[in-house]
Structures are given as C-alpha cells and as structure tokens.
Amino acid sequence: MKRVSVIVPCRNERRYIEGFCAGVLRQKLPPNWSLQLVIADGRSDDGTRDILKRIAAGEPRLAWVDNPKRIVSTGLNLALSRSDGEVIVRMDVHTEYADDYIAQCIAALEESGADNVGGPWRAEPDAQGGPMQHAVAAAFQSRWVAGGARSRDLDYDGWADTVYLGCWPRASFERFGGFDEALVRNQDDEHNLRIVRGGGGVWQSSRIRSVYRPRAALGQVFRQYLQYGYWKPFVMKKHGQPASVRHLVPGAFVALLALSVLLAAAGGPAWPLRLLAQLYGAAVIALTLMVAADARPSFDVAWRVPAVIAAYHFGYGIGSLFGWWDALVHRRGRERFSALTR
C-alpha cells in the first residue's frame, strides 16, 4: 500500500477548516493508495485549533502540528517533516478541489516523470460573492492581465516554470530541499525555480482541477499583491535572476511614474508624467476590454475591473521597490510585509 500525504498551512480558518478537511478525506484515490492529511496551524486564535483537535480525535488520517512562526513556508516544512507519504500534495484551505484532484496529481507524476506537477490556477467568486469579487476573479483569470503566465491557462498541458500548489515525489525534497523559510510569499515560485535551475522539471496538467476563491475587497487585493511584489526580489537576489521578465515591469513602471511626479513637482517638464499616465490609462482600458471579451461580465462587474487591474499593478510594483531596497540594503524582510492579507 502506497501513501500520499497532503500538507496544509493554515491560520484562523474556523469558518472553512471543517469543510476543507471533509473534502480532502473524501478524495477518490487510485487503487492501493492511502491518504494522510497533515495541517500546520499558525497559532490560530479563532477556534480553528479546537476544531482540528476534535476532528483528529476521531480521524486517524488527520494530524496537526503547531506552526509558531505562523507563515506559510514554515508551516509547509513542519507538515512535510511530519508526513510519511511517498507522494506529497500541497493544498490550500481557500481552494475547492475536484473529487479526483489527488488521483490526477499522482497520474501526472507517473506520466510526466516531473519533479513537481500541478494544475492551472482557476479563480471563481463565492456563490454569494459581490461584484468586486467577480471583478477580481475575471481580471485574475485573464492571460493578458497575468502577463502571459501559463498557470492561468486552463487548457495548457506541458512543462512550466511554476504551477498552482503542487505535488511532488518525496525524492524531490531530498534532492532540492524544502521551502525557503526566509520568504513569507513566493516560496512556491522559488522552490519551482530551484527545481528547474537544478535540472528538474515542473509539469502542468489541465486534468488537475481546482477552484481558488479570490479576495473580495479591493484593499485586500492591493495588500496581497504588495506582498507578492515585495518578496519577489528576495527570490531574484537568491538565484541571481528573475523568474520572468514580467515580474520586473510593474516595479519599473512605478519607479518611472514616481520620478516623473518628482520632476514635475520640482518645476521640470510635465510631459513625461502626462505621457506615462496616458499610456497606462490606454493599457488599462485595453486590458479591461480583453477581460470583458473573455469573461463577459455584467456592467456592475465590468466597471470595477480597471480598479482591480490597477491594484494588481501598483500593489506589485510598489512592493517590488520596497523589496529591492530591503533585499539589497537591509538584506532581510520587514515584519510589516508578513501580515496576513485575508
């Protein structure tokens, strides 16, 4: 009998954790496979731990461990150290999974021979989600807004630079190591970059199906992408290269915009600022039309899409600039960029 271990970091998930655990434990596995679920709780103070204790008392397949540092990377490594499966699958509490999600992960590993496999990143609003969450999901799913990232292409099958969540043979962690605990965000991208640069392979399969529930408020989206942008330079500095050129563009744009504002405020020419504003406005309009063509949202949703796109770009760009400063000058991350964004 082979075993697959599901590792999950969580904190303050009282509303979702019981349903999540039930869904994982209902997964349809291939013949001769058993399941282990290991959850690393980041010192929850909303009752999540009480629920985990109650479920674990009656369910031998579930174990939970304490994650005193509270961040995702330490939680993943703690759960990994407690697991004993030949195959490791990462799951997230705010994602819903097809009944054969784990089975398809195992099949993709066997068929591809990759060191990590995963499915595309599909975002959908909650059943009772408001117009803003619908706009966030529509913009998120657009390949144009995502800069051509293959992880947003729901039909792509093949080699990739990164995948959503992930599934690894245990040997991958023995060969490439665990998750970088210096990173609050982007630890999955960094691990995949380490695999690829180390001669391994990452494979995306459209048969591995899941649905991610995005943030429902614009401020949450901005803070989420502020963190993504902030921690990406630490990944780039560690490996001496960006994972993709698209990760550099938002920061460069924000820097040029800030310089143009300072130039105009100091009495210099204002045309660089006007030009940048006009070009960016035109780009946002074009991206909004592309999102509308793909998602066909209602007007109540569509008029919110430009603000969501701007939150993505400016959050990531501003975060990148702070990240580069801290990565190069202070050589460590700031506590304020480690807080939860949900």
Image: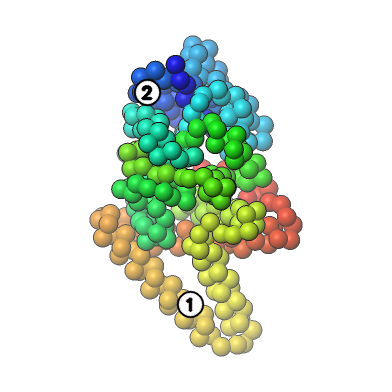
Q: What residue appears at the point 53 percent right and 56 percent down from the top-left corner?
A: 243
Report crowding for label 1: few under 14, some 14 to 19, many 20 or more residues within 10 A (C-alpha): some
Q: What residue appears at the point 58 percent right and 35 percent down from the top-left corner?
A: 173
Q: What residue appears at the point 64 percent right and 84 percent down from the top-left corner?
A: 266
Closer to us: 161 or 282: 161
Which amino acid lies under the numbered mark 1 shown in the image of this protein?
A: Leu
Q: Is residue 92 among the parts visible in the rendering?
A: no
Closer to us: 208 or 12: 208
Residue 304 position (above or below residue 88): below
Residue 143 position (above or below residue 63): below
Q: Is residue 251 among the parts visible in the rendering?
A: yes
Residue 325 position (above or below residue 126): below
Looking at the image, tell me whether mark 2 or mark 1 is earlier in sequence order. Answer: 2
Q: Nearer the viewer, mark 2 or mark 1?
A: 2
Mark linked to residue 276 = 1
Mark linked to residue 29 = 2
Q: What residue appears at the point 63 percent right and 46 percent down from the top-left corner?
A: 183
Residue 230 position (above or below residue 283): above
Secondary structure beneath dot 1 equals helix
Q: Position of residue 121 (x, y in %)?
A: 40, 45
Report crowding for label 2: few under 14, some 14 to 19, many 20 or more residues within 10 A (C-alpha): some
Q: Position of residue 32 (x, y in %)?
A: 39, 18
Q: Position of residue 278 (x, y in %)?
A: 43, 77
Secondary structure beneath dot 2 equals loop
